[in-house]
């Protein structure tokens, strides 16, 4: 048994220290086959008792209390460099498997100590752990996971803050071992040199960083990099950084100073800021440093030696090839200073459009898309960094011939999401649809399984293609077969959508077989509605009138009748300037035909307005014209030469609205009254048109007789359709007063469910249920209607309080085999279900042995009964 006995700075001391857990209190024996199982932060600390053992995390650990351990020094890192001044037992050489658990809130605050992290110095294995909200402060070799790593770190992600002087990194401080499939979102600060988002310093013949990333901000002085501060040998491959990198000299988006090491397949999208030798990929390249198959879109800012790719290339042996940079964002040139002849190229500056979407494949083909990179709708990403792929089609039930959008979304290891809708590869198992660059096109009806593939992952969506809306006229009627030339004719047509999907379609008015106009109609499948189509015949003759293929018969167009103006009268005698003056005009038609003519209003002999008036045969029609006077005075009015009287106009400011009183609330779409107080300072009684407006729209008007030199209260009615609190204004010609009005949502009967059997046998009954909910703010009643195959068969009136719901049910009995639709409708909503009607079994020959031929229950009765039931009303709603 190993027991922790040391006291003081090296042990658990202070007013808030860890409990002295011992390894023999933990589950397991520490072997590879039977590792110690860590379940508490105290047991995590106990790893210092045996640095060669094997450990696993048994659960998530909240290490927040370590902030107060050891008089504020916090957690004591596991293992240390035996050659350091703080040697306390040697490096960690065992294995630690986090089993994808999380250690949160770990604190180490030892600014004078080297080798600071969860593990101070490690030659062992650390894997499969998440360390979040960590706070690490040390001197040299400081990182959240490992201060100094010469072992392996795999599948480790960290968040938090790290600070030190030299070799300070988000994941590892100094690394000569292997880091793979790991990431850091850590704010890193180094007061001297070698600061990196992932590792502060990196090197050695066997040193590797692969498939890893850093997204935190890095602040340092010299050798500052988004991934690594300093490299001295080894390989950095398939990495990326997205944070802000700030320093003085040798500042790079990926690597600060790059010595005798290979940088392959990296990218940087953050900001690199410094004074000297600042680059989007590398600050300074020295001694056989190489960069290949990489790109940078980072914003590079430096006083001297600033380059979009590298700030300074100081050795002839440096090798760069297939590197791309955004010429619209980065520095104006690839290299700040280039003292080498070994740049093999291409080193290519591109625009944003050239580096994103499909264009990236062509313009950045040196990256080797497919095995290593995936093109997205934005910049390329590493295939390894794509954690999950999601795929959706905007409209999965679509009309034949229509298009819809396909969306492919990639979730990356660092938490970002990016779309690849235009760059994914698509396929279908059916000819009903095809996909190109994220647009789904349909050509025939049916069902298709649509697949999207990117970064080695394939996702599938099901697409159903239906017959498009087909709104067709089934019946047409015209009230008259003899009409006057140029007189408007109303043609009423009944239309139904015979398609499989709701939507818009056009119906065509056809005169003598030629289409003269089209009307756009919206409709649900199998729902009938009446639509009025207007026609104004211009020429005399006899015409065949039809809407689509439904005929209205023959219409004869003849000379228009003579219409006469019988009388005209101004409906007010005194108004204020700016108020509209209504003038009533009566026009007579003594002919046998309906006719139309323009009625023209004149003021003081000058025509001011005219309006087309239609008059039925042998009748007279009274209509209203209007004129708005702008100046005070007295005016003579006439219509078609017939005097309408004299109107006196007083100044506009004679009429003033002083107050408006609104009700406690109103219902949307229903009338309400308000009291408007108006003052008339004129010496005559004035007729004034008072107007109610809500959000600038007129919602009610009335004419009021306002006595001379008096204040009058007038009731004005209005209707507001939109619910909520609205500002209601009462207005005269020259003034207004406003008040708030609360408008409740009117009763709205939504069909929230329609339950119908998927199949039924012809001649047999089946029950259909519909659930109705009043989603408005007030009580109301509506009829609920049931249709079978487009024909209404029953209805029931339903009354519901606001927010209440009910279910009604009825029996259907279709008479013939095939596919039919059952539709439930309210005034506000409808739902449709498709029912397959199976053929009835062939009845046994009457009179055969064992056959009951009595009426009412024998074979064959069901079909006859179904026909009768359908004709008499094939369904009967029942309330539940």
Image (tube, helix red, strand yellow):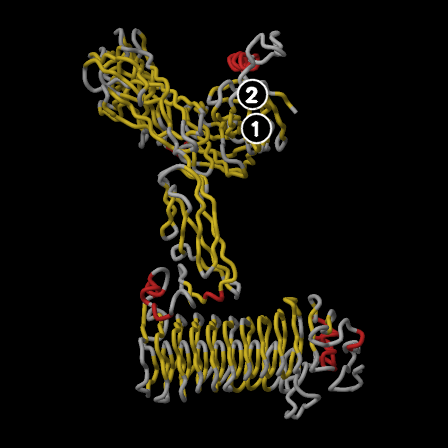
Could you tell which of marks 2 and 1 lies nearer the N-terminus? 1
Residue nearer the viewer, 690 or 487 = 487
Query: Dot 1 corresponds to which residue?
Result: 756
Left or right, 577 with reference to 152:
left
Distance between mark 2 and mark 1 Cα atoms: 10 Å
Regarding residue 762, the answer to whether it shows in the image is yes
Around disc 2, counting alpha carbons within 10 Å, would you say few (fewer than 14), some (14 to 19), or many (20 or more)?
A: many
Left or right, 44 with reference to 123:
right
Quadrant location, the N terminus: bottom right
Q: Is 53 above or below relative to 396?
A: below
Quadrant location, the C terminus: top right
Q: On the image, which quarter does residue 800 sit in?
A: top right
Whether residues under marks 2 and 1 lie with C-beta atoms below 8 angstroms apart, the answer is yes
Which label number is shown at residue 812?
2
User: Looking at the picture, how far across and down is residue 91, in whole percent?
Assistant: 65, 85
What residue appears at the point 61 percent right and 70 percent down from the top-left corner?
128
Regarding residue 219, the answer to whether it shows in the image is no
Badge 2 marks a residue whose secondary structure is strand
Left or right, 36 with reference to 294:
right
Around disc 1, counting alpha carbons within 10 Å, would you say few (fewer than 14), some (14 to 19), or many (20 or more)?
A: many
User: Looking at the picture, how far across and down is residue 598, in whole percent?
Assistant: 25, 20
Which label number is shown at residue 413?
none
Residue nearer the viewer, 49 or 878 = 49
Badge 1 marks a residue whose secondary structure is loop
Q: Is 836 above or below relative to 233?
A: above
Q: Is 626 above or below relative to 35?
A: above
Which residue extends farthest front?
849
């Amino acid at each position: 048994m190993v027991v922790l006995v040391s006291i003081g700075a090296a042990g658990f001391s202070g007013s808030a220290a860890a409990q002295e857990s011992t390894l023999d209190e933990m589950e397991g024996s520490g072997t590879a086959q039977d590792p110690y199982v860590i379940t508490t932060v105290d047991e995590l600390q106990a790893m210092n008792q045996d640095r060669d053992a094997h450990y696993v995390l048994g659960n998530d650990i909240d290490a927040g209390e370590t902030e107060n351990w050891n008089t504020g020094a916090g957690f004591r890192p596991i293992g240390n460099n035996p050659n350091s001044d703080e040697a306390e037992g040697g490096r960690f050489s065992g294995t630690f498997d986090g089993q994808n658990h999380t250690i949160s809130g770990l604190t180490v605050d030892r600014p004078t100590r080297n080798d600071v992290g969860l593990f101070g110095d490690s030659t062992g294995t650390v894997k499969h752990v998440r360390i979040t909200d960590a706070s690490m402060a040390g001197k040299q070799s400081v990182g959240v996971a490992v201060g100094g790593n010469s072992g392996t770190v795999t599948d480790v992600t960290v968040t938090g803050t790290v600070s030190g002087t030299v070799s300070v990194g988000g994941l590892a401080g100094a690394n000569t071992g292997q880091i793979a499939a790991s990431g850091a979102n850590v704010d890193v600060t180094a007061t001297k040199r070698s600061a990196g988002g992932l590792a502060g310093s990196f090197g050695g013949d066997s040193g590797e960083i692969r498939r890893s990333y850093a997204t935190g901000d890095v602040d340092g002085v010299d050798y500052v990099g988004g991934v690594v501060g300093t490299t001295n040998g080894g390989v950095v491959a398939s990495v990326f950084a997205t944070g802000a990198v700030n320093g003085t000299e040798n500042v790079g988006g990926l690597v600060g100073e790059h010595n005798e090491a290979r940088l392959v397949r990296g990218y940087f999208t953050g900001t690199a800021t410094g004074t000297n030798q600042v680059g989007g990929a590398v600050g300074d390249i020295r001694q056989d440093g190489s960069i290949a198959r990489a790109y940078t879109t980072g914003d590079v800012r430096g006083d001297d030696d600033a380059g979009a790719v590298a700030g300074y290339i100081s050795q002839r042996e440096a090798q760069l090839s297939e590197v791309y940079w955004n010429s619209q964002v980065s520095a104006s040139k690839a290299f700040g200073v280039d003292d080498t002849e070994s740049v093999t190229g291409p080193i290519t500056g591109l625009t944003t459009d050239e580096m994103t979407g499909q264009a990236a494949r062509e313009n950045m083909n040196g990256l080797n898309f497919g095995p290593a990179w995936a093109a997205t709708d934005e910049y390329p990403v590493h295939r390894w960094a794509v954690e999950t792929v999601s795929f959706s089609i905007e409209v999965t039930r679509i009309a034949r011939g229509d298009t819809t959008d396909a969306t492919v979304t990639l979730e990356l290891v660092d938490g970002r999401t990016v779309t690849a809708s235009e760059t994914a590869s698509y396929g279908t198992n059916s000819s009903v649809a095809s996909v190109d660059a994220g647009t789904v096109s349909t050509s025939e009806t049916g069902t298709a399984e649509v697949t999207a593939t990117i970064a080695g992952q394939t996702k599938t969506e099901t697409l159903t293609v239906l017959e498009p809306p087909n709104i067709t006229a089934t019946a047409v009627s015209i009230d008259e077969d003899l009409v006057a030339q140029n007189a408007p004719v109303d043609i009423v047509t009944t239309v139904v959508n015979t398609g499989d999907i709701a939507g818009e379609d056009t119906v065509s008015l056809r005169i003598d077989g030629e289409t003269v106009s089209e009307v756009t109609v919206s409709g649900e499948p199998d729902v009938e509605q009446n639509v009025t189509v207007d026609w104004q015949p211009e020429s005399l003759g006899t015409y065949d009138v039809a809407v689509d293929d439904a005929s209205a018969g023959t219409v004869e167009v003849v000379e228009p009748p003579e219409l006469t103006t019988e009388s005209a009268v101004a409906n007010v005698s005194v108004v204020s300037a700016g108020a509209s003056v209504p003038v009533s005009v009566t026009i007579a038609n003594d002919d046998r035909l309906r006719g139309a003519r323009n009625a023209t209003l004149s003021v003081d002999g000058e025509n001011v307005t005219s309006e087309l008036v239609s008059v039925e045969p042998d009748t007279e029609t009274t209509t209203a014209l209007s004129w708005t006077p702008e100046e005070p005075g007295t005016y003579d009015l006439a219509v078609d030469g017939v005097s309408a009287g004299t109107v006196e106009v007083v100044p506009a400011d004679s009429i003033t609205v002083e107050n408006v009183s609104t009700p406690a609330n109103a219902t949307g779409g229903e009338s309400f009254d308000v009291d408007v107080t108006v003052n008339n300072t004129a010496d005559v009684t004035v007729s004034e048109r008072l107007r109610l407006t809500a959000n600038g729209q007129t919602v009610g008007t009335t004419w009021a007789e306002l006595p001379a030199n008096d204040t009058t209260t007038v009731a004005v009615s209005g209707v507001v359709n939109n619910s909520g609190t609205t500002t209601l204004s009462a207005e005269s010609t020259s003034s207004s007063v406003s008040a708030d009005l609360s408008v409740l949502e009117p009763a709205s009967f939504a069909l929230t469910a329609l339950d119908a059997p998927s199949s039924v046998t012809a001649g047999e009954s089946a029950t259909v249920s519909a659930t109705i909910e009043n989603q408005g703010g007030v009580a109301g009643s509506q009829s609920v209607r049931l249709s079978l195959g487009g024909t209404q068969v029953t209805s029931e009136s339903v009354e519901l309080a606001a927010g209440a719901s009910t279910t009604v049910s009825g029996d259907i009995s279709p008479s013939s085999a095939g596919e039919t639709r059952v539709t439930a409708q309210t005034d506000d909503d409808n739902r449709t279900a498709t029912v397959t009607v199976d053929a009835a079994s062939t009845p046994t020959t009457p009179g055969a042995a064992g056959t009951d031929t009595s009426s009412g229950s024998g074979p064959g009765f069901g079909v006859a009964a179904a026909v009768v039931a359908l004709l008499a009303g094939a369904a009967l709603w029942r309330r539940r």
